[in-house]
Image (cartoon, rainbow, N blue to C red):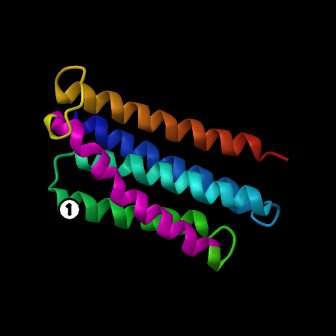
């Protein structure tokens, strides 16, 4: 399962690279509304999913929050650097916040008795289902942005 989680983290990071390389070529042609929508969705979603995946790797809570928030800050800063300094700071902070939220959302999946939620069985099945769903959402949103931006 650890290899699957590491694979999904690599998929998420490759989606960041794909989105950045695609929009870096066209950064002068992008509309302000499209840039702001891109800045709020892509770093948020990728940081949230990466935070959950890092927490599922079995690190301590502090280390997973630290790693995922720094990773979210870097992802948000990279995507935000497509436009100007204001969008850089907005996107970096947005990635940081959602990087902190990822391990918080993943905590009840590890121990469902914490919140009294219903689970489908063992925590391993729930981890695999949630991590796969998150990675698929990242891929779908990234590819949708790339597809809708073609001119």
Residue 21, position as x, y percentages in the image: 63, 56
Q: Residue visible at 18% across and 34% down?
A: 112
Work out whether residue 26 can be spotted: no
Where 18 sits versus 69, above or below? above
Residue 98, position as x, y percentages in the image: 42, 57
Q: Residue visible at 38% across and 40% down?
A: 8
Q: Secondary structure at mark 1?
A: helix
Left/right of residue 105 with respect to residue 149 in the rendered view: left
Residue range highlighted in magenta: 87-112
Q: Quadrant of residue 37?
A: bottom right
Q: Residue farthest to the top?
A: 121
Where 63 sits versus 16, above or below? below
Q: Which residue is mark 1?
A: 63
Number of marks: 1
Residue 146, position as x, y percentages in the image: 69, 45
Image quadrant holding the N terminus, namely: top left
Q: Residue visible at 19% across and 20% down?
A: 121
The majority secondary structure of the magenta stretch comes to helix
Residue 70, position as x, y percentages in the image: 36, 67
Where 151 sits versus 86, above or below? above
Q: Is residue 88 in the magenta section?
A: yes
Foreground: 45 or 13?
A: 45
Left/right of residue 114 with respect to residue 89 in the rendered view: left
Q: Quadrant of residue 119?
A: top left
């Amino acid at each position: 399962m650890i290899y699957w989680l590491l694979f999904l983290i690599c998929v998420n990071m490759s989606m960041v690279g794909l989105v950045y390389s695609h929009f870096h070529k066209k950064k002068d042609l992008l509309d302000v509304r499209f840039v702001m929508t891109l800045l709020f969705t892509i770093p948020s979603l990728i940081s949230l999913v990466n935070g959950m995946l890092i927490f599922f790797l079995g690190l301590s809570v502090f280390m997973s929050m630290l790693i995922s928030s720094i990773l979210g800050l870097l992802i948000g800063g990279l995507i935000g650097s497509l436009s100007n300094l204001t969008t850089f700071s907005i996107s970096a902070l947005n990635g940081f916040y959602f990087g902190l939220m990822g391990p918080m959302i993943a905590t009840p999946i590890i121990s469902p008795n914490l919140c009294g939620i219903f689970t489908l069985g063992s925590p391993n099945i729930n981890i695999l289902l949630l991590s796969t769903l998150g990675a698929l959402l990242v891929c779908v949103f990234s590819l949708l942005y790339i597809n809708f931006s073609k001119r």
